[in-house]
């Protein structure tokens, strides 16, 4: 049992590391796009004297801030804190429909499925 818990924890840690690494890799590409778009829109707005060309920078900036926070910031800690808060104060939101599966309910579903399969084979 202890080995299984250690293995599950290592798998969770690896998945989280992959998620953070993916966020950092995505940030490189999105950061390049954001920089080029910002420079291009700024130059276009100045040359054409149309300040509304700067408008797309605002939503792109919010996305950039989120990606930076996800890759290098404290987003993961805030999400973890919120999850812990939900588990302690809003635990009823986590209940599964029809409750937690039991051995009896799983066996009943398995028997029903196997009897349906044998019926369809006939």
Image (spheres, helix red, strand yellow):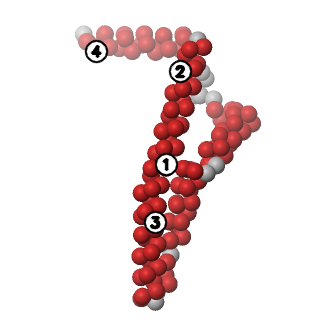
**Which of the two discs, 1 and 4, sits closer to the camera?**
1
What's the CA distance linking mark 3 and mark 2? 40 Å
Circles 2 and 4, Cβ within 8 Å, touching? The answer is: no
Separation of marks 2 and 4 at Cα, in angstroms: 40 Å
N-terminal-most mark, 1 or 4: 1
Residue at 69% over, 36% down: 84
Residue in front for this viewpoint, 48 or 111: 48
The Cα–Cα distance between marks 3 and 4, rounded to whole angstroms, is 57 Å
Measured from the top left, where is residue 109 in percent x and y? 46, 15
- The first of marks 2 and 1 along the sequence is 2
- Residue lying at 52% horizontally and 61% vertically, measured from the top left: 64
If you read the primary sequence from the N terminus, does the residue marked by circle 3 or circle 2 appear first?
2
Residue 55 in percent (x, y) is at 50, 75
Q: Where is the C terminus found, in terms of image quarters?
A: top left
Q: Mark 1 and mark 4: span between their CA atoms?
A: 48 Å
Question: Which percent across, then down, holds residue 89?
Answer: 75, 36
In the rendered image, residue 90, in percent from the top left (x then y), is placed at 71, 37
Which numbered disc flags the more N-terminal residue, 2 or 4? Answer: 2
Mark 3 touches mark 2? (CB < 8 Å): no
Residue where numbered disc 4 is placed: 120
The reply to whether discs 1 and 4 touch (Cβ–Cβ < 8 Å) is no
Mark 2 to mark 1 CA distance (whole Å): 24 Å
At x 69%, y 41%, the residue is 81
Earlier residue among tags 3 and 4:
3
Q: Residue 23 carries which label?
A: 1
Residue holding disc 2: 7
Name the one closer to the observer, 87 or 120.
Answer: 87
Residue linked to disc 3: 34
First of labels 3, 1 by sequence position:
1
- For disc 1, the neighbor class at 10 Å (few under 14, some 14 to 19, many from 20) is some
> Residue at 41% of width from left, 82% of height from top?
44
């Amino acid at each position: 049992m202890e080995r299984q818990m250690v293995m599950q924890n290592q798998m969770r840690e690896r998945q989280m590391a992959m998620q953070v690494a993916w966020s950092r890799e995505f940030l490189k590409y999105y950061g390049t796009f954001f920089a080029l778009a910002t420079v291009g829109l700024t130059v276009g707005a100045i040359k054409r004297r149309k300040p509304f060309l700067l408008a797309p920078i605002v939503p792109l900036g919010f996305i950039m801030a989120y990606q930076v926070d996800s890759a290098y910031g404290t987003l993961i800690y805030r999400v973890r804190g919120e999850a812990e808060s939900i588990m302690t104060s809003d635990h009823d939101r986590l209940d599964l429909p029809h409750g937690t599966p039991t051995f009896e309910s799983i066996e009943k579903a398995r028997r029903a499925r196997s009897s349906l399969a044998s019926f369809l084979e006939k």
